[in-house]
Amino acid sequence: MHRNWHIIPLTCLCAGMILLAGCDKKEAAEISPTPDVTNNATSTPNTTTEGTLDPTQTPNSTTDTTNETTAESPIIKPKVDSKDSYRATKPTLMGISLQTSKEATISRFGNPPSQFRMEDDAEAINVLEYMDFSVGFNNANKLQFIEVRTPNVDPGLNGLRLGQRTQDIVSALGKPDQNSKYVLSYKSQGTVLKFDIDIKEDRIQSIKLFAGT
């Protein structure tokens, strides 16, 4: 049988060329690696690591004082000097007399938290209201009355305060000019020092100094 020997070398040559081309492609693939997309992609710098500032956050430039307690200034009560305490020869209340001017009163106690005008049948009275007491002046700025409203202040009556008993009045100031179930009063130098009494509790419920005979 006649064989085509001349075809065999040609076939081998073609196979060798194909094999060589395949090797070249493999080497090219190994030389040119596929780009790492994750490495080449633009990444946002980690700005939250220790020692760095996150630009998306506002810098804390102020001190947090939310939990700090602000101490309130203590309320200073007016004190009456012993020389300004009530005496029959010099009737006073809260250390001031009916001859004390409005300017001197404000200078002593400061500006009142509130004030109002009280219309009276005789004349209008401008009332200055302080925390524990009030004072009233007429249109000529002459002091008309001083009234103590709470037991939280010493009115300058030898230790006597609102809320104490009737007997304490006598012990502090002596025998009154008027003595009834409802009122005890002392008259001196054209003034009246009046104590209104709560008869159920037998306690002082108001103290007032005003002009009178």
Image: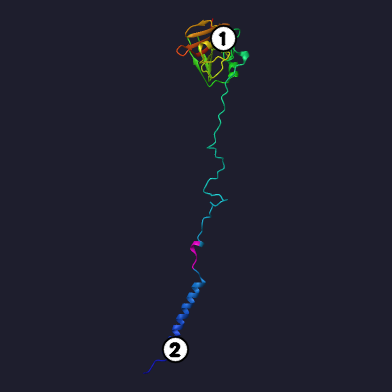
Identify the element where label 2 is drawn.
helix
Does the stretch in magenta take in 57? no
The residue that appears at 61% across and 13% down in the rendered structure is 84
Q: What's the residue type where badge 2 is placed?
A: Pro
Foreground: disc 2 or disc 1: 1
Q: What's the residue type where badge 1 is placed?
A: Leu
Q: Estimate how packed mark 1 is, as few (under 14), some (14 to 19) or many (20 or more) residues with alpha carbons within 10 Å.
A: some
Closer to us: 97 or 111 = 97
Q: Residue 98 at x, y = what percent? A: 57, 11
In primary-sequence order, the first of circles 2 and 1 is 2
Quickly name the residue at label 1.
173
Viewport quadrant of the C terminus: top right
Q: Is residue 209 visible?
A: no
Quickly name the residue at label 2.
9
> Residue 187 is drawn in which quadrant?
top right
Q: Residue furthest left?
A: 1
Identify the element where label 1 is drawn.
helix
Closer to us: 4 or 204 = 204
> Residue 161 is drawn in which quadrant?
top right
Q: Residue 56 at x, y = what percent? A: 51, 48
Magenta span of residues: 34-38
Q: Residue 1 at x, y = what percent? A: 36, 95
